[in-house]
Image: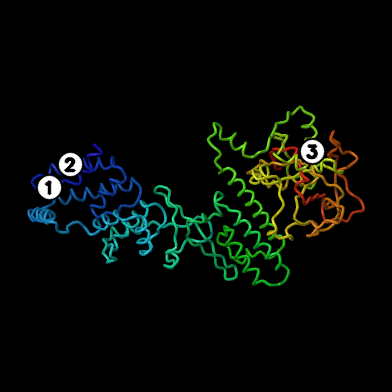
């Protein structure tokens, strides 16, 4: 019945006054059956009656039922003159005259257009051109109440005008600070590139930020894959990351030179490369004008670099696997072996964690979820030349969850040349700690996101250059030195350190103050500038419990 009903509505002839009782019964039946129609069928019937075709299915059903009742009323109160007029309209229709409303003709023309033509027409009319062909067609059909395809203005009834006001579809950009301007210049529209998968059109954003003039604009472009929330993680590229580093490096060169205008210009360039969510705050609040803000943005770009590695790794298709999870694990090229909770290794690591949890980090404690023995492919061979180096220690390294696919698959890495040196207290290197909680803080866990992951690495430190204060070019080591030690005011008691069978020292003693040091750091930091001096030993999965 539902499939035949649209044909019944389309072919039903005008009912003469002599059969009013029959028309009453039939109209009531049609009202009941309207609810059985599909959305597209409902919209077809509404369009043929010059009624709005927008809204949800319940709205469409109510609108069609109201239209049918109106037809019923006209039929029951008709006169011989009405019947004569109906007959004349029927004859005109048979003769090909345009008794069909102009809107119906407009809809027929719209349905025959391609997606590109529809988007161009929508842009010309000031109607949103985002979304699928179906969505654009709906907006243009609604707009045809005002004008036909040749842009000839048409009048509206008060009822249609009210419906148009109430149901006007407005597409806005979620986050990304700005609602897309529908009156973008034609020369920009001419360069749109649309990524289409089936009927879905994937819109994305280019961001142009001028913090000096408090100006933040977005332009639609589909090829580059940007969106308003930030960069889509699957679309990150290495070149984008390096551009972000490069802009931060130029900002670092200007900070401290009292050149506000240049900082505003460079900040705008950075936010164009790496889109941000500014909300409704003033753009001047986001000028990168201090070492602290620079470091924060540097950490963000580092995280994006790790995500770029992860998405590329997981996107690579190495063939169909029976177990997708095991397939992803194999692509890490890092063997992870669980350690039993009753083993000596487990107890040693648990003691190291407990003893070196600093009092200044007492706002949380940590539960061990699992400990894995780690062996990254090729790393033992590269470390071999340092395996007999004196002063090898088992040290902590913490990082965000987003970074671990990149770390496990490619190892700990040093910032690229494009990164500013001022973002690193002791130069560009890989940083470690002998205090568990110092590294745990770099997991950036929260009350809502409690899981964290840390590494215990064997680090070949050799002779160290000991520093009490920041030195951004510390990577230029003095002759004979293999690493840098940022000396902290508190450190594990080395008299309680534990030595492994292979000579690696585990500084698991309880913390004590280091007398005679006027250090800028609370706790020690160890930095190496050659990744071959690092060998992963353990991966520790934990949960943070905030107090």
Which quarter of the figure has residue 396?
top right
- State the separation of the CA atoms marked 3 and 1: 89 Å
Q: Nearer the viewer, residue 364 or 252?
A: 252
Q: Secondary structure at mark 3?
A: helix
Measuring 52% from the left and 64% from the top, which residue is drawn there?
A: 217
Reading the image, the residue beneath label 2 is 26
Find residue 156 and report its horizontal and vertical position in percent.
Answer: 27, 62
Measuring 54% from the left and 31% from the top, which residue is drawn there?
A: 322
Measuring 8% from the left and 55% from the top, which residue is drawn there?
A: 84
Reading the image, the residue beneath label 1 is 15
Find residue 451 and report its horizontal and vertical position in percent.
Answer: 66, 40
Q: Secondary structure at mark 2?
A: helix
Q: Hey, which residue is sitting farthest top in the picture?
A: 342
Measuring 35% from the left and 61% from the top, which residue is drawn there?
A: 121
- State the separation of the CA atoms marked 2 and 1: 10 Å
Task: Tell me the crowding category of disc 1: few under 14, some 14 to 19, or many 20 or more residues within 10 angstroms, Cα based.
Answer: some
Quadrant in which the N terminus appears = top left
Reading the image, the residue beneath label 3 is 354
């Amino acid at each position: 019945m539902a499939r035949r009903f649209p044909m019944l509505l389309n072919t039903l002839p005008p009912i003469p006054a002599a059969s009013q009782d029959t028309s009453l019964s039939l109209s009531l039946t049609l009202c009941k059956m309207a609810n059985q129609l599909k959305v597209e069928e409902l919209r077809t019937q509404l369009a043929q009656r010059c009624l709005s075709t927008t809204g949800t299915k319940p709205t469409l059903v109510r609108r069609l039922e109201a239209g049918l009742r109106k037809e019923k009323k006209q039929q029951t109160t008709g006169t011989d003159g009405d019947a004569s007029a109906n007959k004349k309209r029927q004859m005109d229709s048979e003769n090909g005259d345009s008794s069909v409303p102009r809107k119906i003709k407009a809809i027929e023309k719209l349905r025959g257009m391609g997606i590109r033509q529809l988007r161009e027409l929508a842009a010309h009319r000031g109607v949103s051109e985002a979304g699928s062909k179906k969505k654009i067609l709906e907006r243009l059909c609604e707009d045809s109440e005002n004008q036909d395809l040749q842009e000839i203005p048409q009048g509206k009834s008060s009822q249609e005008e009210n419906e148009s006001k109430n149901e006007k579809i407005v597409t806005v950009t979620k986050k990304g600070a700005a609602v897309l301007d529908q009156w973008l210049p034609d020369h920009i529209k001419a360069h749109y590139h649309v990524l289409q998968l089936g009927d879905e059109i994937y819109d994305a954003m280019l961001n142009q930020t001028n913090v000096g003039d408090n100006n933040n604009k977005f332009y639609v472009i589909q090829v580059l894959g940007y969106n308003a929330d930030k960069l889509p993680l699957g679309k990150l590229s290495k070149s984008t990351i390096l551009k972000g580093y490069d802009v931060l490096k130029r900002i670092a060169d200007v900070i401290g030179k009292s050149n506000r205008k240049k900082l505003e210009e460079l900040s705008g360039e950075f936010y164009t490369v790496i889109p941000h969510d500014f909300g409704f705050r003033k753009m001047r609040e986001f000028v990168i004008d201090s070492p602290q803000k620079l470091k924060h943005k540097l950490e963000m770009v580092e995280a994006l670099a790790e995500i770029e590695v992860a998405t590329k790794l997981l996107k690579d298709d190495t063939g169909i696997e029976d177990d997708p999870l095991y397939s992803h694990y194999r692509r890490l090229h890092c063997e992870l072996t669980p350690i039993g909770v009753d083993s000596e290794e487990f107890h040693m690591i648990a003691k190291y964690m407990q003893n070196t949890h600093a009092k200044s980090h007492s706002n949380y404690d940590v539960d061990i979820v699992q400990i894995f023995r780690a062996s990254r492919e090729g790393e033992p061979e590269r470390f071999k030349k340092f395996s007999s180096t004196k002063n090898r220690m088992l040290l902590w390294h913490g990082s965000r969850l987003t970074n671990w696919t990149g770390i496990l698959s490619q190892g700990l890495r040093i910032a690229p040349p494009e990164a500013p040196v001022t973002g690193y207290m002791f130069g560009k290197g890989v940083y470690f700690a002998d205090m568990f909680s110092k590294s745990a803080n770099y997991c950036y866990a929260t009350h809502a996101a409690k899981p964290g992951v840390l590494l215990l690495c064997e680090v070949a430190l050799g002779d160290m250059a000991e520093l009490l204060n920041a030195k951004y070019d510390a990577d230029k080591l003095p002759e004979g030195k293999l690493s840098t030690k940022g000396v902290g005011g508190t450190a594990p008691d080395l008299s309680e350190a534990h030595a492994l069978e292979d000579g690696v020292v585990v500084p698991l003693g309880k913390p004590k103050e280091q007398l005679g040091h006027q250090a800028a750091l609370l706790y020690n930091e160890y930095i190496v500038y050659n990744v071959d001096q690092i060998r992963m030993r353990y991966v520790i999965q934990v949960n943070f419990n905030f107090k």
